[in-house]
Amino acid sequence: MRLLLMSDTHLPKRARELPAPLLAELPRADVVFHAGDWVDTATLDLLESHSRRLVAVHGNNDGPALRARLPEVAHIELDGLRFGAVHETGPAQGREARCAARFPDLDVLVFGHSHIPWDTTAESGLRLLNPGSPTDRRRQPHCTYMTATVEEGALTDVVLHRLPPRN
């Protein structure tokens, strides 16, 4: 099962549209995660209509229309792995322990907010993944998103994809 992970798209404020390489991944993904800060409902509509399955949450920059359609925290089980998605997890320092305490029943937590890619595992075994942002790199060298595979109850092939600079 192929996963596509993104967050912090901030459309149309940070870019006019999602990058073509990211859009090209949609038909290949069995499940798409978006960890919040959409800003516009058009992006949600696009992902809902082009994703086989969408797991999504709202972020701190999302207004009432998105908050009415999306939860703050989402949960899904995929091939025996328990996933969660949330926008904010707080400061980097202490993140693993804080998230392990907040989400003791998860195997994988997809989050966003910082626009900084993150892939660590808490002592409890909780895997924390932040795909960065495909549209707003902030202080990062590249805009990014992630793909991963769930196979036989295991998360494998977690890849951070760097996007080319926008013109």
Image: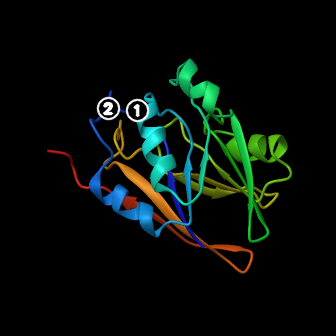
Q: Is residue 162 above or below residue 57?
A: below
Picture quadrant where residue 35 is located: top right
Among all residues in the image, which is located at the extreme front? 49
Q: Residues within 10 Å of mark 1 (few under 14, many from 20)?
A: many
Q: Is 46 left or right of 17, judged from the image as shown?
A: right
Q: Is 45 left or right of 17, judged from the image as shown?
A: right
**Which amino acid type is shown beneath numbered disc 1?**
His
Percent position of residue 80, x then y: 79, 69
Q: Residues within 10 Å of mark 2 (few under 14, many from 20)?
A: some
Percent position of residue 41, x then y: 46, 31
**The N terminus - image quarter:** bottom right
Element type where label 1 sits in the image: loop
Q: Which mark is residue 150?
A: none
Quickly name the residue at label 2.
Answer: 14
Q: Residue at x 42, y 39 (%)?
A: 43
Percent position of residue 92, x then y: 61, 39
Q: Residue at x 45, y 28 (%)?
A: 39
**The C terminus - image quarter:** top left
Looking at the image, can residue 70 be seen? Answer: yes
- Tell me whether the residue at label 1 lies in contact with that at label 2, contact meaning CB atoms closer than 8 angstroms: yes
Q: CA distance from mark 1 to mark 2?
A: 6 Å
Of residue 98 and residue 158, the one placed in the foreground of this image is 158
Quickly name the residue at label 1.
Answer: 10
